[in-house]
Amino acid sequence: MRFTIVGAGGLGGLLGALLSRSGNDVSFVARGETKEVLTRRGIELSSPLGQFSVGPFKASEDPAVLGPAEVIIVAVKAWQVPEVAERLKPLVGSETLVIPLQNGVEAADLLQSALGSGPVAGGVCHVFSWIEKPGHVVHKGIPPQVTVGELEGGVGKRLERVAEVLQAAQIKPVLSRNIRGDLWEKLLFVEPVGSVGAVTRVSVDIFRSMPESRAMLTAAMQEIQTVAGDLAIQMRPDALDQSLARVDRLPPGSTTSMHRDIVEGRPSELEDQTGAVVRLGTKAGSSVPVHQLLLAALLPQERSARLRSPRA
């Protein structure tokens, strides 16, 4: 199967390496040093699934150079989706499937606005991987899990076919009949952990153990549950309890990528996660005072990071 992966970071690089190793035709939309390394030598992967190198790959900053793909995996940060969405049109053929794997709940709708409703499905990824240096991806823990579903609900033949290809590449596929609910359930977990972690400046094992910060975390999760309900998004009845239990299972020292980006002064997904809860809560008429406070506390750092990174 012909895949084009938009973004060659920890997620895109990992998926691309595994898909290529299993015999798929993989290309990347990438730029700068990462693009040069991909076209010259490819990707080195350090993972429980194997230590190997694969490539080189066809890669370009200009999607038009790559031509149409059967599957486009959008693996850039959520805040980069509005900028790349229009540029992906040359990759989309009559049978192309577009799968966004961002944190947050708005990426698929942004892509639909640019590319039309037909090609775009919904996707959620659970994985722990990062770029050690351009061209070297490190993956820890369980195999990557990719959940996919049609945005209007259900699972079509095109997703079943992609799931078979993912399975062969040691990427665990999950076919969902309620992908929007899955997106909100991930947000319910990852956003409060990220924003409370960034505000407190400590890892999850510390803030989950203190009554005051744990109460903030729980209240933030409850607000997301309320907003989802007010928007008629169906989540599992025990979604909040499962998220809290997952927080308690995280190993000491754990932080989210949003937390790390904010603390280290990089542009982050703050406005796509915490900001999205405030925006969508306002739209739904929901009360989200904890998120308003978290956003207000973190937004000055986010704006400063973006001033230092003109392309952000």
Image (cartoon, rainbow, N blue to C red):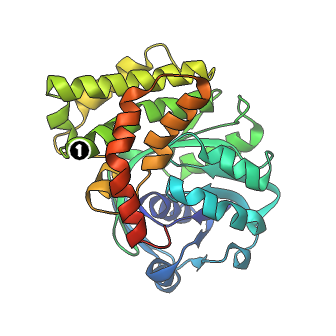
Residue labelled with disc 1: 254
In this picture, is 232 found above or below 114?
above
Q: Nearer the viewer, residue 148 or 33?
A: 33
**Horizontal and vertical percent position of residue 178:** 63, 27
Residue drawn at the location 47% of the way across and 64% of the way down: 13
Check the picture and name the quadrant holding the N terminus: bottom right
Q: Nearer the viewer, residue 167 or 35?
A: 35
> Is 177 on the left-hand or right-hand side of 166?
right
Q: Splitting the image into 4 quarters, where does residue 308 fall? A: bottom left
**Horizontal and vertical percent position of residue 160:** 69, 40
Q: Amino acid at mark 1?
A: Ser
> Is 111 on the left-hand or right-hand side of 216?
right
Instruction: Tell me if residue 113 can be seen.
Output: yes
Residue drawn at the location 32% of the way across and 37% of the way down: 193
> Is 248 on the left-hand or right-hand side of 188?
left
Residue drawn at the location 38% of the way across and 50% of the way down: 299
Residue drawn at the location 18% of the way across and 34% of the way down: 207
Which residue is situated farthest in the right direction here? 94
